[in-house]
Image (cartoon, rainbow, N blue to C red):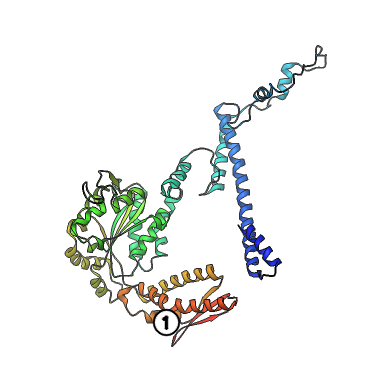
Amino acid sequence: ALEVERAIIGREAAIGIDVADRQARVETGLAETELTLAAAQQRWDREKALVAEILELRARLRGEGVPLDAVEPPGAVAETAGADAPEVKAPETDAPGPDAPEPDAARATTADPSPPDPAADLARLRELMAELAEAQGETPLILPSVDRNAVAAVVQDWTGIPTGRMLSSQTEKALRLAVTLSERVVGQDHAMEMIAKRVQTSRAGLGAPEKPVGVFLLCGPSGVGKTETALALAETLYGGEQNLISINMSEFQEAHTVSTLKGAPPGYVGYGKGGILTEAVRRKPYSVILLDEVEKAHPDVHEIFFQVFDKGMMDDSEGRRIDFKNTLILLTSNVGSEVIMDRTSSGTVRAGLDDLDTALRAPLLKVFPAAFLGRVVTIPYYPLSDMMIEAITRHQFAKIARRLRSSNDAELVIGDGVMDLVKARCTEIESGGRMIDAILTNTLLPELSRGVLNRSLEGEKMTKVTVGASEGGFTYSFE
């Protein structure tokens, strides 16, 4: 595609069209692509040579004498060409002279002087397999046999289950899960540690095999990172946010809406289509399930999850048993937010977890039965402090900078005082991180976009945008 675009640019330049910027960008992209292609070709050649030697050694160790991909013997080639080839008589020869070698001696000189050594071949095979594994990493180009990695790749392509990535680095991801999640979810390290411990227990094979990986009830004010936790877990554990099954439980405030989750029974409208929960888990058995605002659902809806939490399965309307043992279930709730805000003085005091757990018990029992709370792990989320607001703001600015670089090839620089201005405008602690997004979306981004569009209309080249702060609000400098 880049070569085609370069040819088009050449034709446009020939008729006087200004294509300097496009040509420079295409030439840079083409050079990078050629380097990537050369590296991929070099890696392909190396893996191909290693796999060829591995197959040859395996054939020799099996005692077949020739590799599996050997060419046809000369006799077979002669037979295929014998009908059309002219018949040639072999010349008559006299008896061998005194200097001619004996037949046995001739065969001895052409044979391999070194006898086969299975032990040496096996050692060399292991050495080659280790070298191939090191060269391939997580993305092999050639596989010497149909092994678990090959099957995992096919299953991933067919079903969307990221088995390849899960097989390659399960242990490392599980051990670093708390750190990885804390980089994305700000200020809730205690919650990340609790979730990581349960995931590590499951990965080690020490948890109940029939139960889900974990069931957690995340309680706290709005906008403190509960939904972001689910997104981060789906990305880290299951290969992407597309493996998040999110259901807003406020849509299930009547008892009859249970059929929407499991599927309509025979004779009812919608029978045969499957429930939104059971069908989603059937299609994506490796996923994170987010039940948002679970306190708003009808008590009968709460009860259908008892079997899921205890036995890791649910029967849909057609009698199929849906397996939940490979899912991680997160429930979010705003119940007890007032208690948490009061104990933490609206985020200015870091209360103890035991104190918060005890204080949350009473308001939770008013909404959920004790049997429900006994099946989940309750995790309180702290309100946002000034440090947490600043960290979240930096994450938001980093996203804006990536979008500006991608769309306009310009750098975003954040000046002094911008963070203080954002924190000063965050007056509604109850809104959490959503107020930061609202400030940037409704104030900064429209003004920044207007400046970008004006310079694009005037044809001015833009390489850097500096955002500052003043008494009147944000300031912008375009270079």
Quarter of the image where one finds residue 29: bottom right
Residue 59 coordinates in the image, percent (x, y): 57, 30
Can residue 118 be seen? no
Task: Tell me the quarter of the image containing the N terminus.
Answer: bottom right
* Residue 291, horizontal then vertical, whole percent: 29, 59
Q: Quadrant of residue 14?
A: bottom right
Please say if 241 is above or below 344.
Answer: above
Residue 107 at what x, y percent from top left?
71, 20
- Please tell me which residue lies in front, 76 or 383: 76
Q: Residue 256 appears in which quarter of the rendering?
A: bottom left
- Judged from the image, the secondary structure of the residue bearing numbered disc 1 is helix
Residue sticking out furthest to the front:
15
| Residue that appears at 36% across and 62% down | 229
**Where is the C terminus found, in terms of image quarters?**
bottom right
Q: Furthest residue to the bottom?
A: 471
Q: Is residue 129 left or right of residue 101?
A: left
The amino acid at mark 1 is Leu
Q: Nearer the viewer, residue 221 or 270?
A: 270
